Image (cartoon, helix red, strand yellow):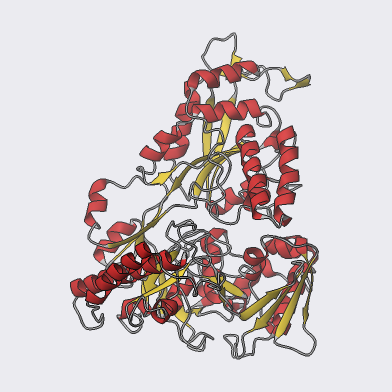
Amino acid sequence: MTRSGTKAGHDEQGFTLVELLVVIIILGVISAVVVFAVRGVGDRGREAAVRTDERTVRTAQEAHCAKFGEYATMDELVTRQFLSEKSTITDVTPVSGGPCGTTPNKTGFIVGYAQPNGGSPAAFDALKLAAGKGNGYPTPFQSLRGPGNLNTNYLFDTLLWRDATGNPLPWLATAYEKSPDGKKWTFTLRDGVKWQDGAPFDADDVVFTFDYLKNATGVTPAQVTQVKNRNTFIRDFVTSVIKVPGTPEKVEFNLNQSVNTTMTRLAQSLLILPQHVWSTITNPMTAAPANANAFMGTGAFALQNPTGYNPGTGVSEYVANPDFFLGSPYVKKLQFITVTDELAALLTGAVSAGGIGSEESVPPAALAQVSHMGRVQNPGGWNRALHFNGLRGFPYNNATFRQAIAYTVDRQALLANIVGGRGELSGMGGLAPSHSYLNKSVPAYARDVDRAKTLLNSIGIVDGPDGDSTRELPASFGGSPVTGGGANFNVTLYTSDRFSNDTVEAIQGYMNDVGLASTYVVEASGAADARAGSANYDMAFVGYGNLTADPDQLRTRYKDVGTPSPSASFNNVWGWNNTANATEFATLANAQLVEPSDTVRRQQLSRMQVLIAEDVPLISLYVPFATIFYPKDGFSAWYSTPGGTPPGPPGFSNKHVFITGKQFGLPAGS
């Protein structure tokens, strides 16, 4: 694969006098820096060496940028004499070609370890991490939510992957080509890959995977829809997958149109199945308990005890595959254990790293206890949202009602009190606050109780003659009778035991401030997801990530997905199809998916965010920062993946870091 953003034409440019002076000074600083060897020094010396070397590399990058207008790879820094030799401690790479200051991280490049885990130790025996409950079985058909997808990716592989750069990384495929019209993608498969049972991986497995998903080959009739919905990109856009004649190591994906999400939704998300196993599995939704081979892939890890896996607790152990095609993984075991307080467990050494939960306001004293540890914190891509089900009729299908609820909610207070200020407020247009496509001009709905009351009054939701200060539904609205009209309006709020009840209870208080009564129901995670996916609610609290992923997520989340069913996504928006905004949104959503001009696509997506914010089909309540703490003398190569680990959230458990111990790149020779 070739990195984008070549340097053609730059090498003949000369320095200006100012540039020359700047570079001379910088190179003088670089030459005076002593680079320490990492291995064999104490923790403090190692940390100092890493920091000093990183400063040296960053200085060289800025000198390169002053000269050439873009950032460079480590090899380019050495070749062009901005460094005397390659660092054995620090590695560096441009992001998206490295133009100065134009990338989301505002630097145009990222730095990381040149050696696994900074050069110490040579391998890592085990990492102990907190297990996530309710993630399902780690198979391509039974995993649940982002964490379940991450676990499945330890066992199964995709054609391409991504590391800390967010750029495509060769994986089962070593290269790809795209036709000029974007409708044909050809992948060159890696030679010598084997399934974990020793059977060879080849193009037939890729073709079979497509057939299994697209045509539900060999699957019982009751499972056809669920299987096809496991990869909607395949279902909607891929017409055929064939082995390229005369070149059996190549496979060709043919699409019905050029689609902007092909890289993320196809190349980096399609888990390849072993034909010799799955050709005999006719009920993939229940295969795992009955067939241990359902867990078997080409992946870097295998389940220690497949038949004993508990899908409810996620407690498990993944062991390194010594025959993995990129070499035996740097981390030899991943042990997921039950933890009630990750920071407390981190202090006792029970876990190797600990994050801060999405819902808890962590006391300053608890954070102070881990202040000496390493930390990675990034803008978040997960949010807690309040969804309205427009299919239930008035008032949930009424934009004025939804706007009124938005004005009752004090999102700033939720951010401060629920998340402890460790996060941001999402724009009401549906993307993460840090998203490069974010429209920052959409309505924000700052808390305004008087305005909320006025809006409720305007649609007839007023306090009735009983004078009990609780609003009633009107007997009719828009000429149609209202279910429950003429009686006190009591909203049932559904939530999941995956999260604390603090947010729900806060919302109840806000609604009570404007005369709206409510009760809430807490359900087990799986049941709550099934309820959300089948549109069996009036209003529901849902937590999900991917807000940093490709902005096409707006189309897939807000579009009318048809008849509700348990196979639909729990984060879908229901019944938002009866307004002019929704009609315009649908047109733009389909257009941005295939729009070749990024400038035009940005305009389309900006308008889509305005339409969402005006109609408020859901309220994004808060977006916590992604944070992880770790001992500095332990595994310390953690990073958060830009845009998420396909198709999951940006969390810190990208399999790439466990395989390589580095933030980006692959082992030499791979």
- Along the horizontal axis of the image, is 656 left or right of 27? right
In the rendered image, the quadrant that contains the N terminus is bottom right
Spot occupied by residue 239 in the image (x, y as percentages of width and height): 81, 68
Spot occupied by residue 181 in the image (x, y as percentages of width and height): 77, 66
Q: Residue at x 74, y 89 (%)?
A: 247
Q: Residue at x 63, y 74 (%)?
A: 290
In the image, residue 140 above or below residue 623: below
Spot occupied by residue 578 in the image (x, y as percentages of width and height): 75, 34
Q: Residue at x 26, y 72 (%)?
A: 28
Spot occupied by residue 45 in the image (x, y as percentages of width and height): 19, 74
- The answer to whether one can see residue 86 in this image is yes
Q: Residue at x 52, y 68 (%)?
A: 151
Nearest to the observer: residue 402 or residue 238:
238
In the image, residue 463 above or below residue 216: above
- Along the horizontal axis of the image, is 636 left or right of 365? right
In the image, residue 476 above or below residue 579: above
